[in-house]
Amino acid sequence: MPTFFEKLNQRAKEIDSLLCVGLDPHTEDLPEQTGAAAREFCLRIIEATHEFALAFKPNSAFFEALGAEGWQALQDVIKAVPDGIPVILDAKRGDISSTAKAYARAAFEVLGADAITLSPYLGYDSLTPFMQDPEKGIFLLCKTSNAGSVDLQDLPLGGHYRLMMVYEKIAGLATEWGTNNNLGLVVGATFPDALRRVREAAPEQWFLAPGLGAQGADLKAAMRGGLREDGLGLLINVSRGISRAGNPHEAARELVERFREAGEITQPRKRKAKKEKVHFVAPLVEGLLSMGCVRFGEFTLKSGLVSPIYIDLRRLVAFPGWMTQVAAAYIQQLKKLEFDRIAGLPYAALPIATAVSLQGNWPMIYPRKDIKEYGTAAAVEGVYRPGETVAVIDDLATTGGSKFEAIEKLTAAGLKVHDVVVLIDRESGAKEALAKEGYQLHALFTLTQLLDHWEETERLPAEQIASARAFLSEHGGN
């Protein structure tokens, strides 16, 4: 059987609509405060709009406020929705798993809804009772449309290589948890930049996007930020803009026409190719300057050359906050690789590798720079087994010479090496030299990318940027 979101995809293509019609029987819209009045109010909206509705979304609060007859009215309203049109129960439930089972039964078995809105606050186990049936869907509260959402949802999270908000973390978790294609996100149309950021974090998920109409969202900005590349993935909710219109049928039709004009939703939508940029947020890269890890001036290098730029990542040990951010950047790259443990190279990379080990929970070893002639006389320190694969961690890459020395000691101990991860590639031939011997270099930044950023943000004088580029062009990073 198709999943909830597969059915949503199919209906969106069939009727060429992204409209979610909200069924919210506000007390001021009812002639009397009864379940019967709420039922008639909603049935009138369903009859007028069903040909344009990709989905209907009754808000349980308005029915629950009317007591037992309101609950019965909600059940009747859901049953009245024509076959083939999904019904999303807007209940925003969230509780421990035993209670969640009862909520799931009420929503899906008793009321007969096809999907439900849930809070992520209690974690994965609170969602699992709702995820048992792939024909049922979940919309997880991510970035809600109300102004107060910034109080918690926009809080920045530490330990990431770029600035990440709480709502982006939720989006990332949704992609991990929604393995049965039955988990979407609630992202308010009132925050188009958040829509864009969440779309980057969750490129395939459907978003339920409230906020158009009474809350004043910009339709074009919301669609620009939230649509998937196939032109779908954005379920735009409108409630009062339809229910309080003189002619709900015409209001729904006009909305769908606006959606089509704004997004051309039935046509594949390719995003413009962007110039490749380093994946970071400015604070981390600015930190390299503020800590003095990257300096500009005149510096005599080991080779004897006088360089206008100097990199010294040994200074990181004096800044534990920045070290945490740097470790998180390594972790993002390491998660893409396969290995059993990490190997930090002496000396500058040992603190970095230690931070990565603690934060990423990977065991660490390190090859000695000088093999001691007493004790165990070990060339590689730490606990390991021959045949295991290690990912090599270093701070910089220049020519690759120090990497080969370390790899030789590691392989002599029976370990396998495929990948080397560094913070900065000085673009002096290390990548090519390592590749020639079958090793892959992964650099979080290249000098060129850093210079491009500092030029674009006008962080450094143009003459310093030009001088550094000229030196790199002539000598590489030597």
Image: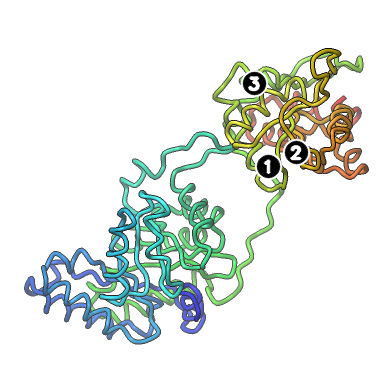
Residue 466 in the image, given as x and y percentages of width and height: 79, 28
Q: Hey, which quadrant is residue 425 in on the image? A: top right
Nearer to me, 128 or 374: 374
Residue 258 figure quarter? bottom left
- The residue under label 2 is 391
Number of numbered discs visible in the structure rendering: 3
Q: From what the image shows, is residue 471 above or below residue 3? A: above
Mark-to-mark CA distance, 3 and 1 = 20 Å
Q: Secondary structure at mark 2?
A: strand
- Which residue is depicted at the point 82% across and 41% down? 416
Residue 119: percent from the left, percent from the top?
35, 55
Q: Quadrant of residue 49?
A: bottom left
Q: Which structural element holds mark 1?
A: helix
Task: Identify which residue is drawn at 35% across, 59% down.
Answer: 118
Of mark 3 and mark 2, the one earlier in the sequence is: 3
* Mark 2–mark 1 CB contact (< 8 Å): yes
| Direction from residue 179 to residue 425 in the image, left or right | right
* Residue type, mark 3 in image: Leu
Task: From the image, state whether disc 2 or disc 1 is nearer to you.
Answer: 2
Of labels 3 and 1, the one closer to you? 1
Nearest the eye: 68 or 363: 363
